[in-house]
């Protein structure tokens, strides 16, 4: 069967590419440029490269791939650009153009082969868990795992979360009833929550139960497609979108709830270009923090008893939530929790440095950006840094571990779920 990419081509962005007036305003905001200081990695430079590729002035060679891989997809340039040039989308389209002409990299092929086969992913997650004792050694402060010997694509210095004993979707039935006449929401679990951080999903279920909402967790859902897009594989992202469209259309939920900032971006921003059915689905997608606030969870949290001792918690805002105008809901939930003391942190909006495939290809730059966040967490005096994206959690925890700090990164939903569970 011929595989088909539904996403826009680089040529579809010609008009937006031409809107870049080379003013350089993006130089002050691009985190990668801040670390590397080279024109080819700043937003302006990438748009120039995309323009040259489109006009046939340069070849899609490895050096071009390297330069275009140096984008975190943080969107900071887009927000600060006077002409709102969608640099992040242009970079993804240029990566697809290169992959179409030269083929995917070995990493891209391996990643997308896995994303297309959820059952294989399930199998590998189980095997990886069993092999963990051999592959990893525990590092101090129970903060994570590090590779004992080389594994493909992963830097040996990186600390990683352990695979869950049982994936989140396997732990629960497909339908969990709430109160009669309450809305039905469908949970989009995302790969990281399903296999690595099921406790985030458990927190979400606690919160949704407190609101009496009916929940469906479609078994046939797949990855949101963002990692495939990041790797330049539009056809795999399109296949995953079609799978999710089928899975989330079945029970006609009132809303589709994402627990991960990046999945939210995958199912909204990247779905809207794919056709009317996808656009209609994207309209029903809502970030869990926004849903919980809109349904009145803050009031329930306010009413919980205050323990004698509460941990100090600070917040990191994921780029993908901020770009959707969703900075506030996670903070509102934390502010309503009587079980924590919320403290401010410098650079709370700065990118954590993960950037999907960016941290695989450019771990040293990723680490430098992470170190800035680790220092900010330390200076805030917090015990925990809470956020709303499992990718950010993995990166923040690695950054804290690399800095030798004892603080832990967690999801807002974990804190909400724990507080509600104690009250039961
Ligand atoms: S991307 Fe925007 S901010 Fe950057 S040089 Fe072009 S027009 Fe200026
Ligand atoms: S999306 Fe972020 S990393 Fe990429 S060019 Fe823009 S500011 Fe730089």
Image (spheres, rainbow, N blue to C red):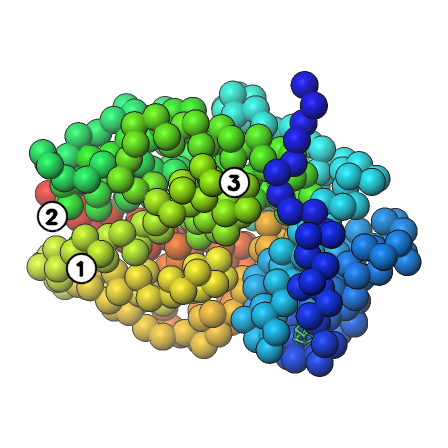
Whether residue 236 is situated above or below residue 170 in the rendered picture: below
Front label number (3 vs 1): 3
How far apart marks 2 and 3 lie (CA) works out to 45 Å
* Residue depicted at 61% across the width and 74% down the height: 83
Please state which of residues 175 and 49 is positioned toward the viewer in this rendering: 49
Q: Is residue 363 visible?
A: no
Q: Residue at x 48, y 74 (%)?
A: 347
Horizontal relation, residue 90 to residue 56: left or right:
left
Q: List x then y, in percent, for residue 105.
A: 77, 39
Q: Looking at the rendered structure, which numbered label has been put on residue 423?
A: 2
Q: Nearer the viewer, residue 109 or 268?
A: 268
Looking at the image, residue 335 sits to the left or right of residue 165; the answer is left
Label 1 environment density (alpha carbons within 10 Å; few <14, some 14–19, many ≥20):
some
For mark 3, what is the residue?
Answer: 275
Nearer to me, 6 or 263: 6
Give me the C-alpha separation between circle 3 and circle 1: 36 Å
- Dot placed on the residue nearer the N-terminal end, 2 or 1: 1
Label 2, label 1: how far apart the Cα atoms are: 15 Å
Q: Which residue is mark 1?
A: 298
**Could you tell me which secondary element the residue under label 3 belongs to?**
loop
Q: Callout 1: helix, strand or loop?
A: helix
């Amino acid at each position: 069967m011929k595989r088909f990419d539904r996403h826009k081509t680089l040529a579809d962005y010609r008009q937006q590419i031409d809107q870049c007036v080379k003013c350089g305003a993006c130089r002050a905001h691009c985190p990668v440029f801040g670390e590397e200081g080279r024109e080819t990695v700043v937003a302006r430079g990438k748009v120039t490269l995309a323009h040259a590729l489109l006009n046939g002035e340069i070849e899609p060679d490895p050096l071009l791939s390297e330069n275009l891989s140096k984008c975190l997809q943080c969107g900071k340039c887009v927000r600060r650009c006077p002409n709102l040039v969608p640099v992040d989308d242009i970079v993804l389209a240029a990566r697809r153009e290169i992959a179409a002409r030269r083929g995917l990299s070995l990493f891209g092929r391996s990643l997308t082969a896995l994303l297309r086969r959820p059952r294989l992913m399930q199998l590998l997650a189980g095997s990886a868990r069993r092999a963990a004792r051999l592959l990893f050694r525990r590092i101090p402060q129970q903060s994570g795992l590090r590779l004992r010997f080389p594994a493909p694509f992963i830097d040996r210095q990186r600390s990683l979360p352990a695979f869950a004993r049982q994936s989140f979707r396997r732990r629960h039935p497909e339908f969990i009833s709430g109160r009669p006449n309450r809305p039905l929401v469908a949970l989009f679990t995302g790969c990281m929550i399903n296999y690595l951080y099921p406790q985030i999903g458990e927190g979400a279920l606690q919160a949704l139960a407190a609101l009496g909402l009916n929940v469906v967790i479609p078994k046939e859902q797949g990855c949101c497609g963002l990692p495939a897009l990041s790797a330049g594989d539009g056809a795999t992202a399109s296949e995953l979108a079609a799978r999710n469209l089928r899975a989330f259309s079945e029970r006609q939920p009132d809303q589709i709830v994402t627990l991960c900032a990046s999945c939210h971006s995958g199912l909204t921003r990247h779905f809207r270009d794919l056709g009317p059915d996808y656009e209609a689905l994207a309209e029903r997608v809502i970030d869990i923090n926004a849903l919980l606030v809109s349904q009145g969870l803050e009031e329930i949290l306010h009413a919980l008893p205050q323990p004698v001792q509460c941990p100090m918690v600070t917040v990191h805002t994921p780029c993908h939530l901020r770009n959707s105008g969703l900075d506030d809901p996670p903070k509102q939930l934390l502010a309503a929790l009587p079980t924590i003391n919320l403290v401010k942190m410098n650079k709370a909006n700065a990118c954590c440095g993960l950037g999907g495939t960016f941290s695989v290809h450019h771990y040293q730059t990723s680490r430098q950006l992470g170190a800035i966040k680790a220092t900010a967490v330390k200076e805030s005096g917090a015990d925990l840094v809470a956020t709303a994206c499992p990718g950010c959690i993995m990166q923040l925890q690695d950054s804290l571990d690399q800095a030798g700090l004892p603080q832990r990164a967690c999801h807002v939903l974990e804190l909400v779920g724990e507080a509600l569970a104690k009250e039961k």
